[in-house]
Every structure is written in C-alpha cells, then in structure tokens.
Amino acid sequence: MKFDRGWLPGARDVDWIESIARPLEPAQEAIEAAAAQPERIPIVDRDSGRVLAALAAGRRRIVEVGTAYGSSTLWLALGQPADGTIVTIDPDRSRTDLARGWWREAGIPDERITVVTAKALEAFEHSEPALAGPFDLAFIDALKPEYEAYLDALVPRLAPGALLIADNVLWSGRVADPAEGDANTQALRAFDRRVLGDLRFRATILPVGDGLLVAGFGG
Ligand SMILES: C[S@@+](CC[C@H](N)C(=O)[O-])C[C@H]1O[C@@H](n2cnc3c(N)ncnc32)[C@H](O)[C@@H]1O
C-alpha cells in the first residue's frame, strides 16, 4: 500500500523514469521523429513501449493488430527472446515498408517479423495462415470501434498463459468521463468492461501512456 494514498504519479515521476531508463536505439529515435511529422502517426509512447518490452520477455510468438511505423513492434521484438517471432497486421503498406527499414536498422532479422498487409478482421476471417497461432502475447492498437471484434478473433488463437495487451484504453481521460460519449470512447469503454469482466482473464488497466490494458489469459 502507498504511504500517501493521495499521491498519484505525475510528469516529474515520468521524467525521472525517462532519465534512468536505457537509451533508445537510433532506429527508435528515427521512428519517433518520422511519426511526429505533419501526418502525425499515433505510436505508443516510450512509457508504454518499455512496458511492452518488459512483458514480451520469454514470449516467443507475438501477434499485433496495427503496425504503422513499427514502433510497438520494435519494442516487442527487443523485449522477446532472440529467436522470437512477431506477426503484425496493417493494411497500409506505405507505413509498414518504412517500418521494415527501421527494424533492420535495429538489427532485427527479417524472418522474425511477418507483416500481414490487410484489414485485421478480414485477415482473421480468411484464416490467413500466419495468424493461426497459438500466440503467447497479443497486442491491439488499431481501430477503436473494432477492439471487441479483434478480441473475439484473438481469443481462440491465444495459448494458455498468454498476455493480451491493448493501447489507448483510457483515451486521454475520455473513457472514465461520463460526459464523453463519442463512438471511439464508447467502444473502448465496452472493450475495457468486457475484458475486465471476463473470467478467462486476470486483467487490469495500467495508467501508463494513454492507458494500457494488460490481461493474463487462463485458457
Ligand atoms: C495507432 S496506429 C498503430 C501504432 C503502432 N502500434 C505503434 O505504436 O507503433 C494504428 C494503425 O492501424 C492501422 N489500421 C487501420 N485500419 C486497420 C485495420 N482494419 N486492421 C489493422 N490495422 C488497421 C493504421 O493503418 C495504423 O497504421
């Protein structure tokens, strides 16, 4: 239990963690710089990325929904064993081709990361072979209204003991704010409720980045 129950971590704490953390790989800095360009591709922030890397330890088979420039993919690849593999899904090849270059720059062999160029639900529905599983970790970070459908598609592909992780589940405070009711917020609320209430999972939400749902799958 905390000594001071009224204390919540703030920007100073995040900065302190940043100051003692392992420096980013040059490829990670390059991805951050590219994502910050005018198109502003939303990628996981460093705090969430470090959680992904820590949770990927010992997880050999990973699936990801939503690749973009491959920042989260790279955090996962750096955290998992050197013989681990990742299957990552994104319909936007112009982004994932750039991602491949940064993964190579970071020393990740091509054969460790398979990109499925498709809309995730269509790829799952068409039983894309690369998505057969079983997977030891699944990370969701694509279309918010589809999070529940990704969950339905992923559960049969999870190994017992797998981790399910999803980004943006607090959605900059909108999910917990009853005054907010746009479609993305409602979808994320429903997703959070569903996973945290599902007895097959031991789940919680880490107030890291934009909110990171972490769930252990009992099978
Ligand atoms: C938030 S970004 C992913 C960021 C990435 N996980 C990271 O942190 O580096 C969301 C990505 O989902 C992709 N996307 C859009 N529709 C999709 C779909 N139907 N299935 C899978 N990915 C989709 C977009 O092209 C975009 O690159």
Image (tube, rainbow, N blue to C red):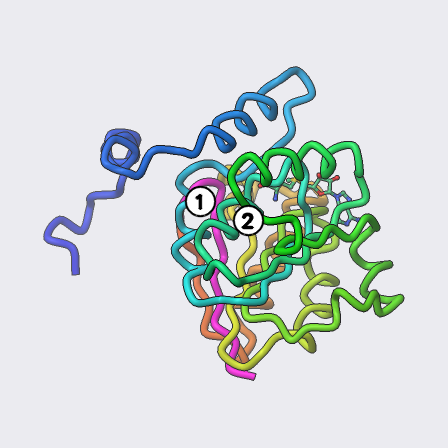
Q: Are marks 1 and 2 in contact (CB under 8 Å)?
A: yes
What residue do we see at 72% from left, 46% from top?
A: 143
Q: Nearer the viewer, residue 16 or 111?
A: 111
Magenta region, residue range = 207-219
Q: CA distance from mark 1 to mark 2?
A: 8 Å
For the residue with label 1, is its CB less than 8 Å from the closest atom of ligand 1?
A: yes
Q: Secondary structure at mark 2?
A: strand
Q: Amino acid at mark 1?
A: Ser
**Residue occupied by mark 2:** 167
Name the quarter showing ligand 1: top right
**Residue occupied by mark 1:** 48
Rendered location of residue 193, percent (x, y): 56, 64
Residue closest to the far top: 38
Q: Is residue 142 above or below residue 96?
A: below
How many numbered marks, from 0 up?
2
Residue 29 on the magenta span: no
Q: Amino acid at mark 2?
A: Asp
